[in-house]
Image (cartoon, rainbow, N blue to C red):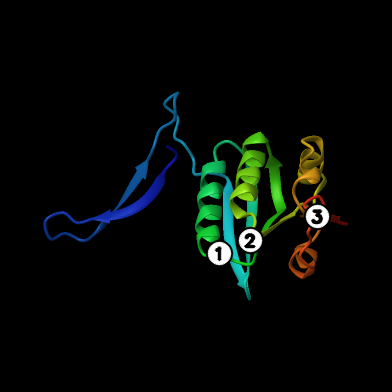
């Protein structure tokens, strides 16, 4: 598990001193925290989860957990914004497909793929035929609910 935390400890009435916890990887090297930032925004009944960084095998469980927590609140629409994602692989695609299955039919899932790196990978995997993909966050939020799951707005 990749974990790095900063805590404090007290020693018999002395001032608090920083305690740095670092987890080590398989070859004795320190493991750095995952290279992905998540931010959530709520606009009416539309939840937006923006990802910034790499969406891969190491960060996919964190994104899956965040999406699950959002879906439990049953928003009318969920927008997953990949416009700041620098790397996307099959683990990220699996999370998006799992979210698509869990969201239907009560939550309208929209994906924002604004860069060539994310859009191209979605297209190669043929997920543009299953997921509703937009090229901007504004378009994903404003688009009417589509009955055709393969709809794509440029």
Q: Position of residue 33 (x, y in %)?
A: 49, 44
Depth check, front residue: 109 or 62: 109
Q: Is residue 144 above or below residue 60?
A: below
Q: Secondary structure at mark 1?
A: loop
Density class for disc 2 (Cα within 10 Å; few <14, some 14-19, many ≥20) is some
Mark number displayed over residue 134: none
Identify the element where label 3 is drawn. loop
Could you say which disc has been placed on residue 74 in the image?
1
Residue marked by disc 2: 107
Contact, mark 2 vs mark 1 (Cβ under 8 Å): yes
Left-right relation of 13 to 136: left
Q: Say whether disc 1 or disc 3 marks the residue closer to the N-terminus.
A: 1
**First-in-chain label (2 vs 3):** 2
SS for tag 2? loop
In the picture, the quarter occupied by the N terminus is: top left
Q: Report, in whole angstroms, how far the alpha carbon at label 2 lies from the one at label 1.
A: 7 Å
Q: Position of residue 124 (x, y in %)?
A: 81, 35
Q: Position of residue 54 (x, y in %)?
A: 64, 44
Q: On residue 148, which mark appears?
A: 3
Report the side of 63 relative to 121 (left or right). left
Near mark 1 (Cα within 10 A), the count class, few <14, some 14-19 or many ≥20, is some
Q: Is residue 138 above or below residue 87?
A: below
């Amino acid at each position: 598990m990749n974990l790095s935390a900063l805590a404090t400890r007290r020693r018999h009435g002395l001032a608090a001193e920083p305690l740095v916890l670092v987890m080590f990887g398989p070859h004795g090297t320190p493991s750095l925290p995952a290279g992905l930032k998540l931010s959530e925004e709520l606009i009416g009944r539309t939840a937006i989860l923006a990802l910034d960084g790499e969406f891969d095998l190491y960060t996919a469980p964190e994104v899956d957990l965040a999406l699950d927590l959002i879906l439990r609140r049953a928003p009318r629409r969920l927008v997953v914004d990949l416009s700041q994602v620098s790397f996307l692989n099959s683990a990220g695609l699996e999370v998006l497909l799992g979210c698509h299955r869990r969201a239907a039919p009560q939550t309208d899932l929209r994906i924002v793929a604004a860069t060539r790196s994310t859009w191209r990978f979605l297209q190669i995997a043929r997920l543009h035929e299953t997921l509703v993909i937009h090229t901007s966050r504004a378009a994903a939020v404003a688009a009417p609910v589509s009955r055709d799951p393969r709809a794509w707005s440029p």
